[in-house]
Image (cartoon, coloured by chain):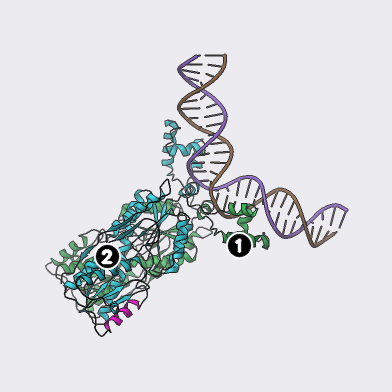
Chain colours: A cyan, B green, C purple, D brown
Amino acid sequence: MFKPVTIKDIAKALNLSTSTVSRALRGGYEISEETKKIVLEYAESINFKRNPIALSLKERKSYSIGIIVCEVANVFFSQAIDGIESIAYNKGYHTIISQSHDQYEREVINIEHLANRSVDGIIISLAAETKNYEHIEKLHKQGLPIVFFDRILESMETHKVTSNNVKGAFDATEYLIKKGCKRIAHLANSEQLSITTQRKIGYEDALAKYNIPLNEEYIRYCDHGGSQQDEVEQAIVSLLNLPEKPDAIFVASDRLSIGCLSAIKKHGAENILVAGFSNSDVVSLFSPSLSCVRQPAFEMGRIATEMLISLIEAKYPVEEFETRILDTVFSPTEN
Amino acid sequence: MFKPVTIKDIAKALNLSTSTVSRALRGGYEISEETKKIVLEYAESINFKRNPIALSLKERKSYSIGIIVCEVANVFFSQAIDGIESIAYNKGYHTIISQSHDQYEREVINIEHLANRSVDGIIISLAAETKNYEHIEKLHKQGLPIVFFDRILESMETHKVTSNNVKGAFDATEYLIKKGCKRIAHLANSEQLSITTQRKIGYEDALAKYNIPLNEEYIRYCDHGGSQQDEVEQAIVSLLNLPEKPDAIFVASDRLSIGCLSAIKKHGAENILVAGFSNSDVVSLFSPSLSCVRQPAFEMGRIATEMLISLIEAKYPVEEFETRILDTVFSPTEN
DNA sequence: AATAACTGTGCAATCGTTGCCGGCAACGAT
DNA sequence: ATCGTTGCCGGCAACGATTGCACAGTTATT
């Protein structure tokens, strides 16, 4: 039904060989200007597009890169994706987005699917549930270029991009302290995530700076990144039920921030101050309000993509890897 | 560097021909059980994956479908995408998502890109800016299966899925009327969009039912779907500057609803009631609050995908097309 | 015993494109 | 007149998987 034009058709119509047509189209120097012109014009006239699939087969390269994030509905990730695409399209790559929904199984399925689909490389931010990394390590060993961003795998030798999570967490926590809060809880993502570790360090640093003792009772982890219904609410409720109820919460991720605010509102605990990581563009509408640490998501996506493409197009195996850490911006609410 | 196993490798290792291996792997009845077992086990042991690109070339089919939406960060679309993927993956298709950002040029580039990439079909919701449909009609004439959802192209003969926009708009407007509002403005998307027309009808119907005269002064269109910075704010400001300031606004899309609330807050017009289309999961946190018309986005995605795959896999050209209209759900805010 | 039928396997073509080799003609140099 | 060079182009093979057809070997039928 949908039958595209091929160089064979052109060759037949112009009484040339397919190889001549092919070379004419790519501007090979061995073809006379005259022939080139004829071929080019005819190709244009019948709206010829070379078949990228045939090319992929021949070149063993697909000019596509796979992206794995937990969910596109999260503004941080959709901004990062925009950044990825801005570079990818310019360099002639196209992107295949897939979502892990923070589930380990889906991450495994998706990454295998992408590898089977012959992507030339993968940009990934790990799922909250992922604790086993064999599926990634296997592909990496096979030579598939992989770049991490945001939730990185420290132990793997490859390029990585993160924001300055320690500093971001420090800023948010310090803000809460300066607002006069004494009992600052910490709602964190899944414990083994790199961002969880880093952000907890920032949280602890801030407490230490102001001589506030660290109370492990005030820390709650969400193993599913907040993707499961009651996860966040239960965490918040258990904090509210503590004998010494916290007067502020530092939240370590976008999704958790939303869940936290909802839970606080639901349980009438609006007097608790909340600061946390979020790239949402609607925080100004929120009530209760949220002071937020913003990550340069678009830029992170750009850099990750430049790194990935440099790996893909490297002529020799790359031995030296880089970890870029970008600054966050803290924006308190006015009220 | 990244060198996958091929059936040739298996054939060589097992001293068979590639055809035998191929048939054994797909369970061809002509191969002895014994041989099948040997091949299957060996393939398994070396982690063989058939190359989908080679298959695509041969079958002239890529088992991938293209999705074009204005932006994935919009919850309505991300839910729809989840619905699309739920069906697509089950039927062995994978998805390529691209964003038009409500711009005509990007829609054109993306759809051509997808067609070149040999997707087997496309699911699309039109960009707000799109007024010329040749890029789509061209592909459709060439036989590429296309299904519209949400923002459909009425004039094209193919399957379509929308929600009941008239009813949804009616509900929202009626709610505002019952709340006692008399001067109900309407913030609409780009004028030529199908959803704009439909939602305006619902708005007018509700006004008519309660004998409120339609005032064209109260209607504002956003040609870029709210994707341009000041678009929404200017519209709201001009409404606020009317001699008879509206006391309520019915907003016709998700993005516009957010923009509208922001503008209202910024200009201290919180006394204006707002109801509008939105699938956001955080409306309960909004202040000012938003009563919203919710669309069954996930279901729309599912249905669109079933339709598309039925087109793709049809043995004979399809002549009869269907337009499915799904019900919306109105959820007022409590306060 | 000869032929038919069937089973299991290999050969070769195919999808669209490109790389490589080789051929032919025209040209200048010897 | 012959040789080497150059410009231009065609043919073949290959990328990986599938498949119609052919063929060898075995078993069943007449």
- Labels 1 and 2 within one chain: no
- Residue B152 in percent (x, y) is at 36, 62
Quadrant of res B125 = bottom left
Q: Which element is circle 2 on?
A: helix
- Please report the bounds of the magenta region as a residue range: A229-245
Residue B3, above or below A36: below
Q: Is residue B330 visible?
A: yes
Residue labelled with disc 2 = A166
Residue B274, above or below B49: below
Instruction: Report the chain holding disc 2.
Output: A
Q: Which element is circle 1 on?
A: helix
- Mark 1 or mark 2, whichever is nearer to me: 2
In the displayed structure image, the side of residue C30 where residue A168 appears, left or right = left
**Marks 2 and 1: in contact by CB < 8 Å?**
no
- Residue A329 in percent (x, y) is at 22, 62
Quadrant of res B192 = bottom left
In the displayed structure image, the side of residue A180 where residue A102 appears, left or right = right
Q: Is residue B256 visible?
A: no
Dot 2: within a 10 Å radius of its alpha carbon, few (fewer than 14), some, or many (20 or more) residues? many
Residue labelled with disc 1 = B41
Residue A257 badge: none
Asked whether A241 falls inside the magenta stretch, the response is yes
Instruction: Report the chain holding disc 1.
Output: B
Amino acid under disc 1: Glu
Point out the residue furthest to the left here.
B243
Q: Nearer the viewer, residue A251 or B271?
A: A251
Which residue: 16% across, 75% down?
A180
Amino acid under disc 2: Val
Q: CA distance from mark 1 to mark 2?
A: 49 Å
Asked whether A282 falls inside the magenta stretch, the response is no
